[in-house]
Image: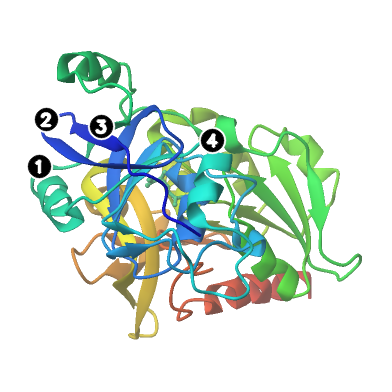
Amino acid sequence: MKQPERKKAILLLEDGSVFEGYSIGKQGTSGGEICFNTGMTGYQEIYTDPSYTGQIIVNTTAHIGNYGVHEDEDESASPTIKGIVVNDFTYQFSRNTATEGLNEYLERHNTVGISGLDTRKIVRHIRTKGAMNAIISSEIFDIDELKAELEKVPSMESLELSSQVTTKEAYELGSDNTGLRVAVIDYGIKRSILQNFVKRNCQVKVFPAKTALSDIEAWKPDGYFLSNGPGDPAAMDYAVDSVKELLNNNKPLFGICLGNQLLARAVGIDTFKMHHGHRGLNHPVKNLKTGKSEITSQNHGFSVDMDSLKNNKAAELTHLDLNDNTVEGLRLVDKPAFSVQYHPESSPGPHDSTYLFDDFIQLIKDQKS
Ligand SMILES: NC(=O)CC[C@H](N)C(=O)O
């Protein structure tokens, strides 16, 4: 595939920094919270993870697009990110099984991007100054005009986004009557998480984020799963209230990422906005029960407050981040409920933590027998 003629694009950060590069994907103007992912691979899974809704992703790995995209590797129906910032964008991909080039894919999904930037410099900037909003444009080059557009972009703090990405209708997956019925509350779920349940012989029903408990119970689930998802958990009282109701039933409950934050809030533990979040595929976490460490896939900009967790009698810390000592997992003391901040489905990422799905299923089996 021939490289199209390169058109100019600019990236403007909230603190006034301007970077000039080339337009990739859809031409246009798009703003969101800028964040970086340090993974060396898995760009398609990252761009389609609904947890990134409303964000512009900077990939620190230098080559993006070089293996194209494959229709089976989407984590959701389409990307809901606000844009991508990359260094060397490759139009000509080298993978004989790829079904499309990344540029056509981004155009088809109306995703704006900018290439040719020194992404390491941008990352150092965000790492020093903290999370902030940014805007990419291939049409507005007047900085004051672009600043006015950037001011319209909402702050990620206090933003509720799950209701934009949750399923509209409930749906079922997996084989019937396996005796393991998992009710998934969809706050922006990744497909690979659902596949982890189906692969383990679970019958799964995925419910919209605002489903009444009675409708979930009508399906007679054996356990509940709280999904990952975008936005600030502190802006999700409706979800925290429904988690409290689920906990009253004393059935096994497992949560990932946003699900971890919602479980914490449901028992009165605080969450907070991090300085610049954790996003990558090589974050070391220590399992405090086994003493072993795991290399994990992560994507979060909010976190469960350690002091608040330590002062809370209902929960205990199970997983610790070895980079910055933040909370990476917790369990409830008197209920069969646990959760992790990182992504054990590891799509993309190393598979050290998939035992958590087995632990959850074991909890369901134990309770049933
Ligand atoms: N991956 C997720 O579920 C992200 C949770 C939350 N939106 C955060 O940024 O912390």
Residue 115 in the image, given as x and y percentages of width and height: 29, 49
Q: Alpha-carbon distance for marks 1 and 2?
A: 9 Å
The reply to whether the residue tagged 2 has its Cβ within 8 angstroms of ligand 1 is: no
Residue 149 in the image, given as x and y percentages of width and height: 29, 17
Type of amino acid at the residue the image marks with label 4:
Ser
Q: Alpha-carbon distance for marks 2 and 3?
A: 9 Å
Query: At numbered mark 4, what does the secondary structure look like: helix, strand or loop?
Result: helix
Residue 169 in the image, given as x and y percentages of width and height: 77, 36
Q: Residues within 10 Å of mark 3 (few under 14, many from 20)?
A: many
Q: Which is more foreground, mark 3 or mark 4?
A: 3
Q: Alpha-carbon distance for marks 3 and 4?
A: 19 Å
Disc ID at residue 162: 4
Q: To which residue does mark 2 refer?
A: 15
Q: In the drawing, does residue 254 fall left or right of residue 296?
A: right
Circle nearer the N terminus (3, 4):
3
Query: At numbered mark 2, what does the secondary structure look like: helix, strand or loop?
Result: loop
- Cβ–Cβ under 8 Å for marks 2 and 3: no
Disc ID at residue 133: 3
In the rendered image of this protein, does residue 274 appear above or below residue 27?
below
Which quadrant would residue 141 be assigned to in this image? top left
Q: To which residue does mark 1 refer?
A: 129
Circle nearer the N terminus (1, 4):
1
- Cβ–Cβ under 8 Å for marks 2 and 4: no
Q: In the drawing, does residue 254 fall left or right of residue 299?
A: right
Q: Residue at x 64, y 58 (%)?
A: 191
Circle nearer the N terminus (1, 2):
2
Q: In the drawing, does residue 14 fall left or right of residue 78?
A: left
Q: Which is more foreground, mark 2 or mark 4?
A: 2
- Cβ–Cβ under 8 Å for marks 3 and 1: no
The reply to whether the residue tagged 1 has its Cβ within 8 angstroms of ligand 1 is: no
